[in-house]
Image (tube, grey):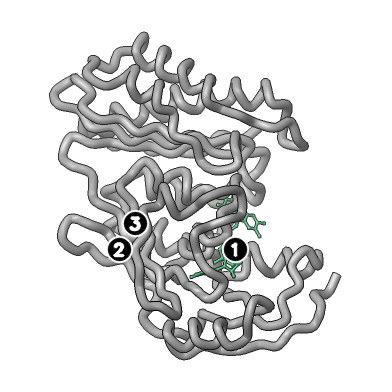
Amino acid sequence: MYPRSFHYHRAGSLNEAVTMAGQLGEGAKFLAGGQSLIPLLKLRFANPEHLVDLNFIPGTSFIKEHSGTLRFGSMTRHAEIERSALVRNIPVLHDCAAGIADVQVRNRGTIGGSLAEADPSGDWANALITLDTTVHCLGPGGARSIPLSDFITDAYTTALAHDELVTEVEVKKPPAGSGGAYLAFKRSAPVYPSASAAVQLTLAGDVCQAAAIALGCVGLTAIRAGEAEAALRGKSLDDKTIAAAAEAARAVADPQSDMRGSAEYKRQLIVALAKRALQIAVRRARGEQVEGAHLYA
Ligand SMILES: Cc1cc2nc3c(=O)[nH]c(=O)nc-3n(C[C@H](O)[C@H](O)[C@H](O)COP(=O)(O)OP(=O)(O)OC[C@H]3O[C@@H](n4cnc5c(N)ncnc54)[C@H](O)[C@@H]3O)c2cc1C
């Protein structure tokens, strides 16, 4: 199906994009990679009167290391993140970028658009929530910075006003002795996961000092598995401890039965994914190079 007709506006700067969206009103939408928005337009689930294109704004696609953080311009494509040597040092991010859909989607889709879309099945929010992540925004009232945990407030809902933009995503680099992993279970590459698990650990010797576990596609937003994290902290991470933590993750998963599987099937997936992600994260925290790859049905 063709989209309903709309007016196209090309912004030359972030400030101009915000001003345009403010003047055009609530019928305006920003266009980034178009990998969520264009299918919605074609299905006529979204019918904006105006599109404000962000693709021609200079200086919005970058990955920079700065004072112990990595900063991603909002228009940075998934594929650029996948290829980045800086990102290789934070494997949970590399796993995430490399596993999103197929190469066509990764070449167009952006990190800013993905967070702004807040799709409960989207990968970025789930991986980024295991790290100390801040979303930098620009609106008519100026710039503001929002912790990722406060940015996504519900399914497809964020703290952004209609004329407010994501400008950068900032991630604090994990300390030495850290390792992470992001694993999803998918029916095929170009579809969203049925379930996913993200893990970020810090070890002191063999003992877990800090742990973050997040579950995707099993709730309205990414879910932090607090009890599973507590089951790891202060412990030596042997098979038994890892299995107990993965089992604890099951309790917070709140999946719906749908075309990707029954709720009970997804709970089983969560336990298996959390266990495998933890095993990979521990090995990476110990300095091993481990390739992580999504699992396919
Ligand atoms: C076949 C297919 C499979 C996919 N599979 C996956 C998958 O497995 N995992 C996954 O995570 N994603 C998947 N995606 C989605 C993809 O990752 C998108 O790139 C992403 O969800 C949205 O990013 P975008 O840059 O394309 O945003 P757009 O589609 O351009 O915009 C999405 C929404 O965000 C708003 N927006 C965009 N940029 C900004 C900004 N800077 N500030 C404020 N608002 C903004 C837009 O107005 C719109 O409402 C898939 C897409 C397709 C087509």
The residue wearing badge 2 is 71
Q: Position of residue 31 (x, y in %)?
A: 59, 75
Label 3: few (<14), some or many (≥20) within 10 Å? many
Q: Nearer the viewer, residue 162 or 111?
A: 162
Q: Quadrant of residue 8?
A: bottom right
Asked which secondary structure carries label 1, the reply is helix
> Between disc 1 and disc 2, whose residue precedes?
2
112 on left or right of 24: left
Q: Which of the two discs, 1 and 2, sits closer to the camera?
A: 2
Q: Nearer the viewer, residue 262 or 148?
A: 148
Residue 134, disc: 3
Asked which secondary structure carries label 2, the reply is strand
Quadrant (top left, top right, bottom left, bottom right) of the C terminus: top right
Residue for point 56% across, 54% down: 118
Residue 254, disc: none
**Vertical order, 290 against 145 (above or below):** above
Label 2: few (<14), some or many (≥20) within 10 Å? many
Q: Identity of the amino acid at label 2?
A: Arg
Ligand 1 within 8 angstroms of badge 1 C-beta: yes
Q: Identity of the amino acid at label 1?
A: Gln
Asked which secondary structure carries label 3, the reply is strand
Q: Position of residue 44 (x, y in %)?
A: 81, 67
Label 1: few (<14), some or many (≥20) within 10 Å? few
Ligand 1 within 8 angstroms of badge 2 C-beta: no
Looking at this view, name the residue that lies furthest to the top.
240
